[in-house]
Amino acid sequence: MKATIVTLPGDGIGTEVVAEGVKTLRAVAQAFGHQFAFREALIGGSAMDATGDPLPEETLAACRAADAVLLGAVGGPQWDDPTAKVRPEQGLLGLRQELGLYANLRPVKLHEQLLHASTLKPGVIAGVDLIVVRELTGGIYFGPRQEAEEVQTAGEMSAYDTMVYTAPEVRRIAHVAFRLALKRRNKVASVDKANVLAASRLWRRVVTAVAAEYPDVTLTHVLVDAAAMHLIRRPTDFDVILTANMFGDILTDEASMLAGSMGMLPSASLAGERTDRAHPFGVYEPIHGSAPDIVGQGVANPLATILSTAMLMRHSLGLAEEARAVETAVEAALAAGYRTQDIYEEGTTLVNTGEMGDWIAGRLVRE
Ligand code: IPM
Ligand code: MG
């Protein structure tokens, strides 16, 4: 098949890990006889430096014309001024909103070989296999907001953000979660703060109503504070976790530790089905950020990005076998003892970002 993939390396280690993602996709193309064309575009702080805009119009146009997008990370200390009007993160948030990427899938699966890489006890995390379905274009990230500079109350600054959800926004993401649960272990845990927030009470009502359409799926409601605790107390009980934008952001960083390292977790941000496309359009990215503390050292773990290319092929290109081949190659790399610094343990072989990518690409081509 022929596919056009836009790459948005962004900032920090984004460039380093996306290079390994491209390496993986090229190896798949070679091994399976596909033609993937790559177009690189700017986003985030590097886009601001080059054009003044964290999400240039050109980037959006390139993404709209592509079959899928592979993104690295945005942000970094050089753009961290809290009073700045333009920030790198606006590029990512704008991309999600402009492309309608409301469904963020973040699978958290512990690779057997990394049982001891986590700071958590092996007995607690053995067998973890859950997926967080995070609503990505609504909630407090996108509600009415007032910056501190805009108003003063009694001579003091004030600022606010607002969590807004409409029933249709909750309904469509709930369907994503329930459909996924049908293909997994038939369990959805919906996470909210319904004991305090009106938006969460609406969330709970709508999710409960959607659940009635999926009699085979068991729905539980969990308050977000309790969910944070249960995630590290009994993580294997979870199958599909359905939650709002900000709760999902926080819980997935926590959940990443169940998989040993942030450097292991891929994600897909999907738009709704469109009649002019055979497969849903999506942006695929590692959940880790730009990691300014390790940038330029070649030590970043590329596996989250490499696993994101598997999700890209599965969801947006319909290439299930190729996706599986990438996941198998990652398993094989871990089984062969290769580790980047973040997952290194005594007795394993320390490799850098490029070496890990080379090994996986080589394995794909050899298969
Ligand atoms: C994530 C990130 C982003 C978010 C930031 C970079 C805006 O933390 O994708 O989890 O908060 O959604
Ligand atoms: Mg986050």
Image (cartoon, helix red, strand yellow):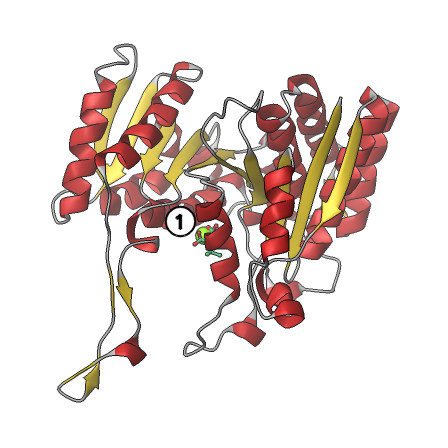
Considering depth in this image, is 210 or 221 the residue closer to the camera? 210
What's the residue at 88%, 25% (across, down)? 366
Give the quadrant of the C terminus. Answer: top right
Which residue carries the number 1 mark? 249
Give the secondary structure at mark 1. Answer: helix
Residue 275, can we see it?
Answer: yes
As shown in the figure, which amino acid type bears the numbered disc 1?
Asp
Query: Please, which residue is most extreme toward the bottom here?
Result: 155
Q: How many marks?
A: 1
Q: Image point 44% across, 49% down: which residue?
A: 253
In the rendering, at what x and y percent does residue 143 appear? Answer: 28, 55
Residue 15, x across and y down, in percent: 70, 56
Which image quadrant for residue 11?
Answer: bottom right
Residue 181 picture location, percent across and down: 38, 20
- Quadrant housing the N terminus: top right
Query: Front-most of 22 and 143?
Result: 143
In this rendering, position of residue 321 left or right of residue 128: right
Residue depicted at x 64% and y 71%: 49
State whether residue 119 is above or below residue 108: below
Left or right, residue 330 beside residue 208: right
Identify the residue at image location x=30%, y=15%.
217
Q: Pinpoint residue 357: horizontal percent, then vertical percent.
A: 78, 42
The answer to whether the beta carbon of the residue marked 1 is less than 8 Å from any atom of ligand 2 is yes
**Residue 302 seen:** no
User: Crowding near pointer 1: few (<14 within 10 Å), some, many (20+)?
Assistant: some
Where residue 188 sits, quadrant-wise, is top left
